[in-house]
Image (tube, grey):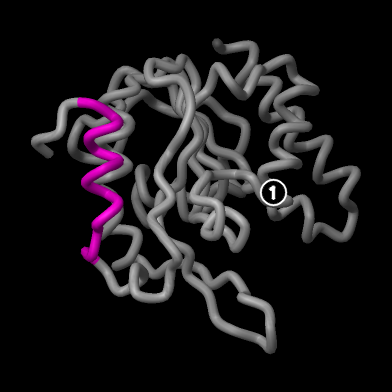
Amino acid sequence: MAATTLKAVARQAAGCTLCPLYRNATQTVFGEGAARATLMLVGEQPGDQEDRSGHPFVGPAGQLLDRVLADVGIDRSDAYVTNAVKHFKWKRAGKVRLHQTPSAGEVAACRPWLVAEIERVDPRVLVLLGATAAKALLGPSFRVTQHRGEWLADGVDDDGAGSRSRIIATVHPSSVLRATDRDAAYDALVADLRTVAGGL
């Protein structure tokens, strides 16, 4: 990718048509935060509020993530937050736009943008929030449920992106909002992010 800065990559991504998701999305939602952050958090895709605002992690899941980060002593303004997929994939149910999980092809199409972010931010710690983010960078066989909260081998997939980052995977904050026992799910996510805080 020719662009050398995050801002330049973001400008390129704004016109992305590499997969069909751009057709129904309001806009590309690129990552935000400190340009040379020690910590990068990667989620799945923008949600409804993110799609409308153009900013990542501003909806209910983002607000919950902010609470978790505060609980473990991480200032979100010091981190860089983004998603594996930059357009909102949804289907309409009445007046509501319901989230749909991106396909493997859609994730693959968006992967160059994510790799570009990792290369330019060069975080010390890379946190993968949920299965889509983890599989985008660690391959389709990776299972968050088997390895959540564990420090993983350095390096990302097969192209060296993020090779200097320590990597940890956990659940996406939205899963806490859907959990039957929200308190237990919240506490488990806090525990995982506390591990992250200890590694910064």
Q: Identify the residue at horizontal 73%, vertical 51% (top origin).
A: 60
Residue at the image point whose x is 64% and y is 11% from the top:
198
**Residue 157 horizontal/vertical position (percent):** 28, 40
Element type at mark 1: helix
Q: Is 94 part of what is drawn in magenta?
A: no
Q: What quarter of the picture does the N terminus occupy?
A: top left
Q: Is residue 11 magenta?
A: yes
Q: Identity of the amino acid at label 1? A: Ala
On the image, the x and y values in percent for residue 144 come to: 56, 47
Measured as percent of width and height from the top left, residue 151 is found at 52, 25
Residue 115 sits above or below residue 109 on the image? above
Give the quadrant of the C terminus: top right
Would you identify the image quadrant in which residue 129 lies?
top right
- Which residue corresponds to the image point at 62% horizontal and 24% vertical from the top-left? 76
Please name whichever residue, 191 or 4, is drawn nearer the observer in this view of the structure: 4
Give the residue pinned by disc 1.
61
Q: Which residues are magenta?
A: 5-18
Q: In the image shown, does 117 or 147 lie closer to the viewer?
A: 117
What residue is rendered at 67% in x and 17% in y?
74
Residue 189 horizontal side relative to residue 92, left or right: right
